Image (cartoon, grey):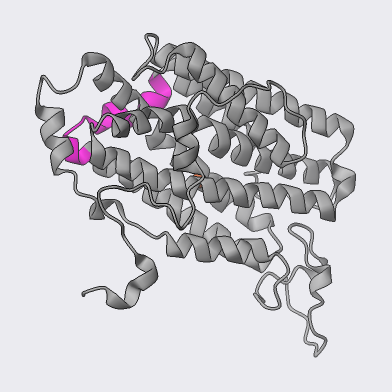
């Protein structure tokens, strides 16, 4: 769109997450959606790279035929199999579906950061596969081969249809609802539910002092993902404020149905890939945990709880609700905040 030559300043009250008036997506200041800027700064403060984590002990533990049980090896590989493609699916959605339609420059700033973080996550899985000498073709193809991973991935990918089209545009009631549905599915379901059984399993390894390097990679990822989820929830709630007509009772019910379907697919994943349970987490506990986090996601966007389950894995909230004062990383802490002290 050509810019108009004018000395009239941008009115930030006209700024919108989508469909912003005159859609100036270049001027960061003055800012309206400060939550996006806060998220951008938090992401930078939490910066990390997979190659900074020592994987030597994991290599020894993986090579030792007596250290891990067959069930633990299977769980480790399947969890990795889910992760390896999940962040690429998330990254594609940000770059191809989300970014183009955001008319808030500060939200675009965070989307750039988030897309890079998804790349770092995919790098982390690649680094684990490479360090342990796993078969990359086997692990990275699991989303096509294992039903419960395939079902989650193909459910998510259906919400790219239409929105990935170069001709898709926001600005009509139907298109805006479709766009909002995409954010809900990717934030609440993909980033808010689909990662969490796998996170719990990796945190289980961590709690057993097994595969600590890999578990630490996943903990850094979990910290980033909880920011992604928060940002997505802020996008949803701000669009609801800016365009309240989109959130009809029918749409709200549709969202509840989708999120419940997401919870069902996640339970199918947990109960079929860990049929005997793992680290004391059995199918019932996974179900309860998935129900608990599903209710939390729903209430964050103003929708009613559906399950009223309590949290069977309270140690997960310690890991997820990480704040600056509390650090659950026992091995090392990478402080990019004090970048001036880095030794080049
Ligand atoms: Fe993410």
Name the side, left or right, on which 315 lies relative to 232.
left
Q: Nearer the viewer, residue 139 or 72?
A: 72
Q: Nearer the viewer, residue 71 or 167?
A: 71
At horizontal 28% and vertical 76% (from top left) the residue drawn is 341
**Residue sticking out furthest to the top:** 276
Name the side, left or right, on which 276 lies relative to 17.
left
Q: In the picture, which quadrant includes the N terminus?
A: bottom right
At horizontal 88% and vertical 37% (from top left) the residue drawn is 248
Residue 343 is situated, as x and y percent measured from the top left of the image, at 21, 74
Q: Can residue 162 be seen? A: no
Name the side, left or right, on which 2 lies relative to 8.
left
At horizontal 72% and vertical 36% (from top left) the residue drawn is 299
Q: Nearer the viewer, residue 110 or 289?
A: 289
**Residue sticking out furthest to the bottom:** 7
Residue 48 is situated, as x and y percent measured from the top left of the image, at 35, 57
- Prevailing secondary structure of the magenta residues: helix
Residue 112 belongs to magenta span: no
251 relative to 223, above or below: above
Name the side, left or right, on which 56 lies relative to 192.
left
Q: Can residue 296 be seen? A: yes
150 relative to 212, above or below: above
Q: In the picture, which quadrant includes the C terminus?
A: bottom left
- The span shown in magenta is 130-145
141 relative to 337, above or below: above
Residue 302 is situated, as x and y percent measured from the top left of the image, at 77, 39
At horizontal 88% and vertical 32% (from top left) the residue drawn is 249
Residue 132 belongs to magenta span: yes
């Amino acid at each position: 769109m050509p810019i108009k030559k004018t000395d009239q300043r941008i009115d930030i009250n006209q700024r919108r997450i989508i469909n912003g008036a005159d859609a100036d997506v270049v001027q960061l200041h003055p800012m309206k959606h400060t939550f996006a800027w806060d998220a951008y700064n938090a992401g930078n403060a939490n910066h990390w790279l997979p190659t900074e984590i020592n994987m030597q002990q994991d290599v020894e533990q993986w090579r030792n035929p007596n250290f891990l049980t067959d069930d633990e090896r299977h769980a480790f590989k399947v969890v990795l199999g889910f992760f390896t493609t999940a962040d690429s699916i998330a990254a594609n959605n940000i770059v191809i579906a989300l970014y183009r339609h955001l008319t808030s420059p500060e939200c675009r700033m965070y989307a750039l950061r988030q897309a890079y973080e998804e790349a770092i996550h995919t790098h982390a899985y690649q680094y684990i596969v490479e360090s342990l000498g796993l078969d990359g073709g086997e692990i990275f193809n699991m989303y096509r081969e294992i039903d419960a991973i395939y079902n989650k991935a193909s459910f998510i990918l259906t919400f790219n249809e239409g929105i990935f089209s170069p001709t898709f545009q926001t600005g009509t009631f139907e298109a805006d609802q479709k766009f909002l549905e995409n954010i809900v599915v990717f934030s609440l379901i993909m980033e808010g539910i689909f990662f969490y059984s796998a996170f719990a399993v990796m945190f289980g390894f961590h709690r057993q002092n097994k595969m600590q390097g890999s578990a630490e990679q996943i903990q850094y990822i979990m910290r980033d993902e909880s920011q992604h989820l928060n940002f997505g929830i802020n996008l949803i709630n701000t669009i609801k404020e800016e365009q309240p007509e989109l959130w009809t009772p029918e749409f709200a019910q549709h969202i509840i149905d989708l999120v419940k379907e997401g919870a069902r697919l996640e339970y199918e994943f947990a109960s079929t890939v860990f049929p005997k349970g793992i680290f004391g987490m059995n199918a019932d506990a996974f179900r309860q945990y998935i129900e608990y986090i599903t209710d939390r996601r729903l209430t964050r966007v103003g929708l009613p709880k559906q399950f009223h389950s309590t949290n069977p894995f309270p140690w997960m909230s310690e890991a997820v609700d990480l704040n600056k004062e509390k650090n659950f990383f026992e091995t090392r802490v990478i402080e990019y905040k004090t970048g001036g002290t880095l030794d080049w």
